[in-house]
Amino acid sequence: MRLAELRVLVLRSQGTNCDAETAHSIRETGAGAEVVHVNKLLRGRRSLEEFHALVLPGGFSYGDRIRSGAVLAKLLASRLRRELQSFVEEGKPVLGICNGFQVLIETGLLPFGEVGEPMLALAKNASARFEARWVHLLRGAATPFTEKLPRVSRMPVANAEGRVVLPLGREQRLLEELEENNQIPLRYCSPQGALAHGEYPLNPSGSFADIAAIATPEGNVMGMMPHPERAFHRYMYPDWTRNGAQGKGDGYRIFQGMLEYAAGRL
Amino acid sequence: MKWEVRIAYKRGVQDPEGETTLQALKMLGFEKVERVSTAKLFIIEGECSREEVERMCRRLLANPVSQDYEIRRLAD
C-alpha cells in the first residue's frame, strides 16, 4: 500500500491538546490522518477497524484527574477492549505520545500487549514539577517507530507524570525481561549518547533505568514520553538560528518509521 | 453510605511532593519533622458495599504498581 492510502486515527478526548499538530505531522509525512473523538468510538458511530494505525496524542485527557491517562485508559479497556485488542493483534501500529503513553500503560497494553491490569506506572516526576525541556534520547531496541532515528536524537518532553515505575522488588527482573524482549527503544542520555543514569536534567523525570519509551515484544505498540510532533522540522529546535533551520527533525523519523511499517504490511 | 478512599504511593516509591514539603517545613524551622507523605482522598457516597469500593480502587482509583489504597467507612 502507498503511504497516501493509509488512514491514521488520532484519538481525541476531552483535554487532549496535541491532536491537531500530531495529525498535521502524519499528513506531512504523507499519510491520511483523521482526528476522532473517543465518544464517537464509544457510541459506535466510528470504528477502529476503519484505520490502519492509531495514535494517542499528548495532552491532559479528562483533565489528568485521578492519574494521568487513567480515565481514558479505563474507558478504552472496558468499552472497546475487543476492538483494541484485535487492532493490536493484527499488528497494526499503535503509538502513544506523552499522555498517550500514560494511557497505554493504564490499559495494560504496555508492556506485553494485553488489555488488563496495569503492570507499570508513570508516577510524578522526581522533581515534583512539570518538566518541559529538550532531552537527548539514545536509540536502543529496534522498533518500526525508532528504526529511522539516529543513534542520539533530540525531542522535547512536557509532562508532570513521566517517571516510569516498575513493580517494587521485581524491578531488576522485569527490566531484564524488557531488555531481552527488545522492549526499550529509547532512553534518556547525554548529548554524546552516554546513558543519563538518573542524572537530572538529562533524565528529566527520574524514570527507572532512564526509560523514555516502551514497546511490546512484537514492536507494533510503543509509548514514548517525548513529543515527536514538536521536533518535526529543524526550525522547531531551540538552536535553529545557530545550527540551521532546514530540513526535517528527529520527530519526523518516528512518524516516517511508523507509516512505512504500516504501508509495508498492507 | 459514605466511604473515604485514600490513595498514596507505596512505601518504597519516591513521593516527590512529600519530599519537597519536608524540605519546606524544615526551612520554616519545623526541624522535628522526619517524613512527609502525600495522599489523595476521595469521599464516595451511595449505596455501595466495601467490596464494590475495593473494586473501584482496583479498576480506576489506584495503580496497583505504584499506589496503595485504604478504605474507611464514614458516619453518614
Image (tube, coloured by chain):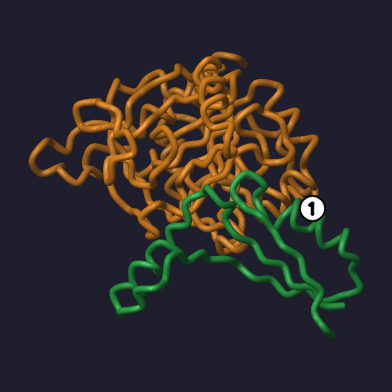
Image quadrant holding the N terminus of chain A, namely top right
Q: Residue at image x 27%, y 26%?
A: A152
* Chain letter, colour orange in render: A
Viewer-side residue, A9 vs A180: A180
Q: Is residue A60 above or below residue A171?
A: below
Q: A1 above or below A189?
A: above
Q: Quadrant of residue A221?
A: top right
Colour assigned to chain B in the rendering is: green
Residue A35 picture location, percent across and down = 57, 47
Is residue B47 in view?
A: yes
The residue that appears at 74% across and 44% down in the rendered structure is A77
In the rendered image, the vertical position of residue A235 relative to residue A179, given as above or below: below
Q: Secondary structure at mark 1?
A: loop
Q: Would you say A246 lies left or right of A47 here?
A: left
**Whole-percent x, y for residue A143 in the image:** 48, 20
Q: Is residue A134 in view?
A: no
* B25 with respect to A108 (left or right): left
Q: Residue at x 37, y 27 (%)?
A: A253
Q: Which residue is mark 1?
A: A43
